[in-house]
Image (cartoon, helix red, strand yellow):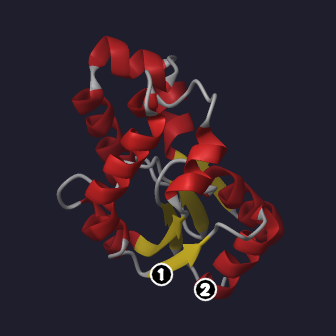
Amino acid sequence: MSELLFLVGMMGTGKSTVGQLVSEKLGITHIDSDIWIESKLKRCIPEIFEEMGEDFFRSQEKNFIENHLPLAPAIVSCGGGLCIADGMMDALKKKGVVICLSASKSEILKRVTEKENRPLLSGSDQERKIAQLLDERSPIYQSANHQIETDNLTPQDISDAVIEISRF
């Protein structure tokens, strides 16, 4: 199969880790949209949000998808909000297969607690913020081509499921 494979979903669901594992197992290119944007702008995501705003960051995600994807076959780990903007999920589906990694609110909270690279969770009451983001984003995430619930799976298990779904 000579397609692009996109991993989408909330922060903390394992997109970056699983993307790298799939890349290593299959010997295909892996790119992480957040790392690409940080490298291009020479700033970490919290700095980008603080200095330029979320709208600017989302425009960079769109630019990445429209103009800077690797050649297929490849796996792309997308930032948690990348597919949320109008038309972005459809754009991903036109370019390849979209797999949503999901996790429960409590599992996401456990995985992202104390991480400093999560500007949408800055401040207090992370649990409420995660619940709100999940409520807002779940309908879009659920429109991905495939779903993998990650709560009780290891990164190896998830990467095996991604490979099985993708048929690479």
Asked if residue 167 shows in the view, the reply is no
For the point 57% across and 45% down, the residue is: 109
Label number found at residue 146? 1
What amino acid is found at the position of numbered circle 1 in the picture?
His
Image: 41 above or below 135? above
Asked if residue 147 shows in the view, the reply is yes
Image: 132 above or below 140? above
State the quadrant of the C terminus.
bottom right
- 85 sits left or right of 28 in the view: left
Q: Element under label 1?
A: strand
Q: Element under label 2?
A: helix
Label 2: few (<14), some (14–19) or many (≥20) C-alpha neighbours in 10 Å: some
**Residue 159, image x, y percentages:** 72, 70
Label number found at residue 165? 2
Q: Are discs 2 and 1 less than 8 Å apart at CB?
A: yes
Query: Going from the N terminus, do you reach mark 2 or mark 1 first?
Result: 1
**Residue 12, image x, y percentages:** 58, 49
For the point 30% across and 46% down, the residue is: 62
Image: 39 above or below 103? above
Q: Nearer the viewer, residue 79 or 67?
A: 79
Label number found at residue 1? none
For the point 59% across and 63% down, the residue is: 75
Q: Quadrant of residue 54?
A: top left
Q: Which residue is most to the top?
A: 51
What amino acid is found at the position of numbered circle 2 in the picture?
Ile
State the quadrant of the N terminus.
bottom right
